Image: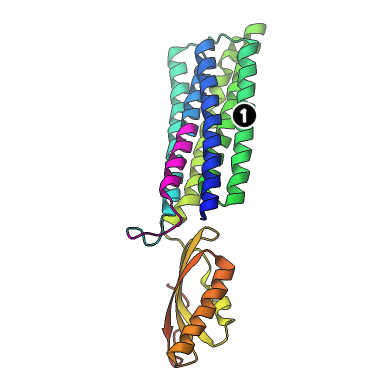
Amino acid sequence: MSHANQRRILGVLWLTLMLNLSVLTIKIFVGLWTNSLSVLADALHSVTDSAGNMVGLLAMRFASPDPDREHPYGHQKYEAVATLAIAFLLGVSCLEIGKSVVDRLLKGDAKVDLSATAIALMLAVLGVNIFTAFYERNMGRRLKSSILLADAQHTMSDIGVTLTVLVGLMGVWLGEAMGWHWLLWMDLWLSIPVAVLVLRSGWEVLQRSLPQLVDEMAIAPEEIHRLVLSVEGVLNCHDVASRGVVGQQVFIEMHLIVAPHNVSEAHAITEAVEAVLHERYAPARIVIHVEPPEYQSDHLTYS
């Protein structure tokens, strides 16, 4: 990741943090004002949005694109660790939603003091959440940032929670107006599918971050093999391995069988191979072990 990209990601995280804090403040105000447990539970979910932004900012602070003595392979995994933290926060959000459902059932208290102003504020919150989620997702795709994409997914789940709360509040309002007491519990029952949504979001975040943390293959060895064999003077390559994230930072290593016996010519061929791989997968760090033409191996990669 370049320094320019890092600065832009930091800017996006700071903006979304300010938006999430404003949403959190409004939800707490509306929840306390209306005595709505669902709105307060929604506010707890928004706490994790803001916490996710803070985790992202901390990760970006340490996720320098350059290696150093203590971290010779760079700092890219800080970002993946941060996305795991966001997945954990999604799980906490799900627990908070479940807790709010149980609390309301045990208390038997469905009273909510609704007003047009409270409904309007929650609609404004929904609009801010929608803008934040789509803005952060688009910037995450443009900057190829897993942390922005994970955080956008988290905000998407907040949209679902807020929609559920709004439907529940409208149900309570209609129940009070029409005398239909069963509608007073509408927002409570609608909280159940929201919990499923949050769990699904957490699983998707884990799927994106775990491959980088466990050094899963980044590039198919057959594709690397095809590119390498296109370089003049290369006879074969084997034990091909790759890790990292294409477009951010990948590490490629291989054993290369070259035609010439001369060290200088063999070195020139390895540089040509590195140039081809850099052109396709940059930024990349490539390690090549050169072997003589009589060496033979049918192990393209590790089995």
Q: Residues within 10 Å of mark 1 (few under 14, many from 20)?
A: some
Classify mark 1: helix, strand or loop. Answer: helix
Q: Which residue is mark 1?
A: 128
Q: Residue at x 51, y 27 (%)?
A: 21
In the image shown, does 2 or 42 lie closer to the viewer?
A: 2
Which of the 4 image quadrants contains residue 95? top left
Q: State the image coordinates of residue 44 (x, y, percent, origin top left).
A: 47, 26
Does residue 192 show up?
yes
What is the chief secondary structure element of the magenta stretch?
A: helix
Number of dots carrying numbers: 1
Q: Does the magenta segment cover residue 52?
A: yes
> Would residue 60 be counted in the magenta stretch?
yes
**Residue drawn at (50%, 66%), measured in percent from left and top?**
284
Q: Is residue 303 above or below residue 184?
A: below
Q: In the image, residue 103 lies at what x, y percent? A: 43, 18
Residue 110 in sight here: no
Q: In which quadrant of the rendered image does the C terminus lie?
A: bottom left
Q: How is the image coloured?
A: rainbow
Q: Is residue 190 above or below residue 143?
A: above
Residue type at numbered disc 1: Val
**Residue closer to the observer: 220 or 263:** 263
Image location of residue 206, percent across then percent down = 47, 47
Q: Residue at x 50, y 79 (%)?
A: 271
39 shown above or below 110: below
| Quarter where residue 302 is shown | bottom left
Question: Magenta residues?
Answer: 50-69
Between 72 and 123, the residue placed more toward the observer is 72
Q: Position of residue 238 (x, y in %)?
A: 46, 79
